[in-house]
Amino acid sequence: MARIIDKIRARRKEHNKSRVDVASADTAPSTSTNSTSTEVATAATATSGTIDSSSWYYSFEFFPPKTEPGLENLLTRIDRMCRRLDPLFISITWGANGSTLSRTLSIAGHAQRFACVDVLLHLSCTGLTREKIASVLNMAKSSGIQNILALRGDPPREKRSWTVGDVSGGECDRAIDLVKLIRELHGDYFCIGVAGHPQHHPSSSKSEEGIDEEMRHLKEKMDAGADFIITQFFYDVDVFVEYVARCRKAGITDAPIIPGIMPIQSYSSLMKMTSFCGVTVPSSVAERLEKIQHDDEAVKKVGCEIATEMCRTLLNKSHDGGVNALTDGFHFYTLNLERSITRILIDLDAADARNVSRSASPTFLIPAVDPQITDSSGPRRERGASISEKVTTTRRLLPWKPSTMENRSKEAVRPINWSNRPHSYVMRTDDWDEHFFANMLQLQFPNGRWGDSTSPAFGDLSEISHFYSFTLGSDEDRRAMLGHCPLSESDVYEVFARYVEGTVPHIPWCETPLQPESFLIQPQLAKLNRYGLLTVNSQPPVDGASSSHPAFGWGGKGGRVYQKAYFECFVSPERANRLTQMVANHPSINMYAINNLGQELRAGVEEGGVTALTWGVFPNREILQPTIFDPDIFAVWAEEAFSLWSSMWLTLYEYDSESYELIERIRDTYYLVALIDNDFSSGENEFVLLDLLLKLGAEAQSH
């Protein structure tokens, strides 16, 4: 679902249904003294005095930087913010007279394809011909973008500002002409947003007649085919409340009106922006800032508090008068910055601090009888970091973030191997069509791609080398992460351990921080890596956790989710051979191992194909199996995994240096091992596979 208006309507429908269900539950006679489920507890906030964070959404605006390093930093930031904060959509701005056309489309296409977020592309008609506009729309469509913010745009360079009655000078004079042209060329394919000005457009007359005329123009844009409104930023909540009332009175009755929120970054920038845009600063806001105006950090902190208070006030007003009364979402003008937005969303309980601070839970196995956060493993286990007691309803439709590209709209299964390199997986499967992704639902794959990794082939590895040059930074950035001069294997082991602990942000095999479900075994993972079992992928066993569980949940409310324990790690040949002996004593465990020469080791494996690693059971739906392991695909992944020792690590050092020879030796001798424990419901509530690996590591340490 790529159209923003469709997503907003679906959220409203689901939220209204939850409110009705909770209201019905409140009035129904109780038949049990133990009737508090996660789902009811979460939805019940809709009828309590607090605001349910799942009932509203947020989005972010970014602008194209002028420099290449700035562009690379922004792409990384967009990826990170979309992964951690999960906005409903993001918007990418359009430079005056199309000056940023190439960069705008490049950033928008990257975000749509790799950040798995729907993009709202700004498009202004100033100075553009119909032919050029048509070309831009076609490029947007080919990039999977289905949302356009139709604007008149900034005045031509020879004009300092628009005046009353001005037109753009292009073949589309006003935003309404652009709305009409989009509908003429593409029908309902694009969702169209338009701009709203709670304190009037700078070019409009400030008289009562001018205000009425501006509202008529807005209504005409909606009648011409626009779907929703995003407003200019403001700092007086009453201004927005009055603006919504005027819109509704003018006949704009059900279109979403999304308030624009711009966190204050500095006192001087606030004065410049509000003066330029004609936005007033209430005395209550000005007084809080004037006394700290020369302390930028203090201004940012207070600016976050002001934005949080504004959002909370608007949500409470919307809650009191029905979810559609004012707004059920916010559009944040980020100024390409991250910290303030993150702080605001955490303060609003909209973003889970775990996803930002990397805290965790001590859970090892989630039992079917009582799928709560527990640790019954006794004192011999080290505890992970604590997890928030608040149980939040997950938004995840699948264990991995679904693509927003049309050709992947039916994608429902992925191999686990690329869990920590999703960009690479998307790039290497980019030519797979919608028909194949739909057929992947049949997990047997008798003649499908999983049975033959070369028919059709995964994309070539050379296609992704340039992409990751910015994902992991410059050579100097990588040396800082991976080591300026590693001289022993223990130096390499320490890098992997520090990644698990969060002090190294990335390693070549993991473009994202540690997954929340792996936080649960964070201390053990760090120990394994210091033992020399270099983990690049893992998941603990789960037996019937609620689909709303904050760490494991996916697929929506009312279901149960399951997963088998899985580990993937690089190990020395001696340890790989020892593992084959140890696995022989555990009939539930399968082991697959391969080295850089293609030599394989297997244990506990019968000839067979695909193994489901994650599945879910939901009311009125077939069993979903979104994460799998396939030995043939593992071989494809192993080729990529070994290549990363060369392309991302080995090349950092001088040829024939000790560091070069160390990384080369690890690449050429170590095995990549995948381990699966098919017994996901141990009666003793133990993580058998983890114990096995810890035992292996301890053996080697003692010699």
Image: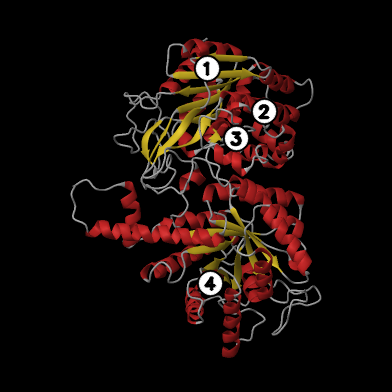
Give me the residue at 73% from left, 19% from top. 661
Pointer 2 residue: 454
Q: Nearer the viewer, residue 173 or 389?
A: 173
The earlier-in-sequence mark between 2 and 3 is 2
- Callout 3, which amino acid? Cys
- What whole-number distance in Å separates the C-alpha atoms at marks 3 and 1? 30 Å
Q: Which one is nearer the viewer's eye here, 217 or 205?
A: 217
Q: Identify residue for label 1.
A: 607
Q: Does residue 65 appear in this view?
A: no
| Distance Cα–Cα, label 4 vs label 1 | 66 Å
Q: Please state which amino acid type lies under the numbered disc 2.
A: Thr
Upstream in the sequence, badge 4 or badge 3?
4
Mark nearer the N terminus (4 vs 1): 4
Closer to us: mark 3 or mark 1? 1
Q: Position of residue 324 (x, y in %)?
A: 43, 69
Residue 325 location (% of width, % of height): 42, 71
User: Residue at label 3?
Assistant: 510
Judge the density around disc 1: few (<14), some (14-19), many (≥20) Cα neighbours within 10 Å: few
Q: Is the residue marked by circle 4 packed among few (<14), some (14-19), or many (20+) residues within 10 Å?
A: many
Tell me: residue 51, above or below residue 664: below
Within 10 Å of the Cα at label 2, are there few (<14), some (14-19), or many (20+) other Cα atoms?
Answer: few
> Which structural element holds mark 3?
loop
Residue 472 location (% of width, % of height): 67, 39
Tell us which disc is closer to us: 2 or 3.
2
On screen, residue 193 above or below 114: below
Q: Where does label 4 land, which residue?
A: 235
Which disc is residue 424 wearing? none
Whether tag 3 and tag 1 are in contact, CB under 8 A, the answer is no
Viewer-closest of 627 and 687: 627
